[in-house]
Image (tube, coloured by chain):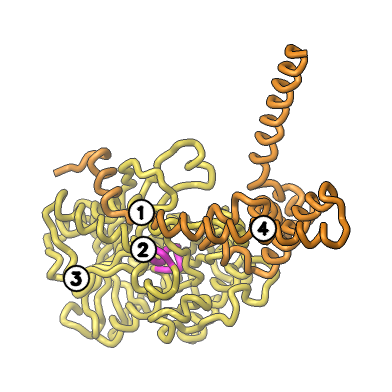
Amino acid sequence: MKRKNNVIEFENLPSIISWSSVVGTTEGNGPLGNGFDMVVGDDMCGKETWEEAECFLQKTSIGILLDKSKQSDTDIDGIYAGDLLNQCMGSGFGIRGYNIPFCGIYGACSTSVLSMIQASISVDSGAMKKAISSTSSHFCSAEKQFRFPLEYGGQRPPTAQRTVTGAGSALISFESEKLCPKIKKAIIGKITDKGVADANNMGAAMAPAASRTISDFLNDTNTRPEDYDLILTGDLGKVGTSLLYELMKKEYNIDISAVHNDTGLMMYYLDEQDVHAGGSGCGCCGSILCSKILNELNTGKLNNVLVVATGALLSTVSPFQGESIPGIAHGILLTSGRGQYE
Amino acid sequence: MNISNNDYDKMVKKASPASPIWINCLKAFLIGGAICCFGQLILSLYTRFGMETETAKPLVSMTLIILTAILTGIGVFDKIAKHAGAGTIVPITGFANSVVSPALEFKSEGFIMGTGASIFKIAGPVILYGTTAASVYGLIYFIIERVTL
């Protein structure tokens, strides 16, 4: 492992040897519905509480991951996982049945990439041979914790995003599997707060962090947006994406719009599914990364993808204490095992 | 160029679509008005069946509360309220929904620490400041009445 300014370079190129995703019904009805490993029949997942349902998502996602990779839990040296619930309940309770050393992390919606970076560092350094990164979020448990009860009759502004019901997990291995997607570089973001205090406009709160992380990464690696097949953020939604383009142009004179997409814009049919500005939550970037993106890297359709997951580090009390929302964005560079970048 | 918080705030305001206020007002007016007309209709029905108007009035409120509780319980109320906005919040239906919805949501933490502790999570401020305002109003009314006597 080497470090060049803000960027970590993985010398052993850890391989992502397997990945899995589980999503809820609304996500299953979205444009990517067919690409997930599992779409649950009802969002309660046959459980008694929303929290249990979220635990089920994460547990099932890891179960599918182990099945797909033909590993048992005792073969795994560690798992980095997180979610949006207090004390990372979705992860801690969802994973408690597995016999895997567990490290819970919180990065709000950036957890999908943060957990993958942590797992990659552990694997590349030799501390672990095989590590899992996993995240989940659930629309109903997030609404209950951060907003209003589900049946409360309120109106949401057009800038609000819908928390994705879903989970995504990836298995990262030290042993280089030739054709699997590889993890090449990573950047751990800096907390960026431009004073946005509106908890119904998370995209606006997170866009400055995304813009900073992307420009730092491009600078430190001496690359331009054209060098990537895709720069994927997750999840800025409609408002955050347009602000990201504007910020990148004004602050850094970089135009990423030609190669950029956002998982918050990809998850739903935005005009038909009544999701306002798009998707959000750890499970949004997590499930899309661990389905469509890794599938396409695996087949060679994509070769070089910079994934930047963004998080809004607010708490359940901070908006009422007059605090603005600190944003964070972590990036990871994934390359295909089949392409020219091998 | 480093963008200041003020400049970013302007960018955010420009990029964030506003709520469709006129359509929202129209929907609130129509649905809120329909709820009030429905209240008037059941008041007329109760009095037609021989009930005293003074007895029928609280019964109208109770009917609307029960209907809201049922609609909240079966997951229909929030779908209407999403369009109605103030149209369902301002009548007594809004208050009923704000009590029933947390009662349902926090049932999972048990009847004491869940439903019991959280049932007034949304309605609590309305009850607290509503009764306080009513007490102050009552006190002023009482003093004025005494002075004018």
Query: In 3D space, how far apart are the residues under numbered discs 4 and 3 (Cα atoms)?
Result: 44 Å
Which residue is label 4 attached to? B101
Q: Amino acid at mark 2?
A: Asp
Q: Chain of mark 4?
A: B
Q: Is residue A125 visible?
A: no
Vertical order, A48 against A109 (above or below): below
Q: Colour of chain B?
A: orange
Q: Amino acid at mark 3?
A: Val
Q: Amino acid at mark 4?
A: Ser
Secondary structure, mark 2, is loop
Location of the N terminus of chain B by quadrant is: top left
Which residue is label 3 attached to? A259
Left or right of residue A199: residue B73: right
Which residue is label 2 attached to? A235
Query: In 3D space, how far apart are the residues under numbered discs 4 and 1 (Cα atoms)?
Result: 27 Å
Numbered range of the magenta stretch: A275-284
Badge 1, how many Cα within 10 Å: few under 14, some, many 20+? few
Secondary structure, mark 3, is loop
Residue B42: x percent and y percent?
Answer: 75, 61
Chain in yellow on the image: A
Foreground tag (4 vs 1): 1
Same subunit, labels 4 and 1: the answer reads yes
Query: In 3D space, how far apart are the residues under numbered discs 2 and 1 (Cα atoms)?
Result: 21 Å
Foreground tag (4 vs 3): 4
Left or right of residue B92: residue A342: left
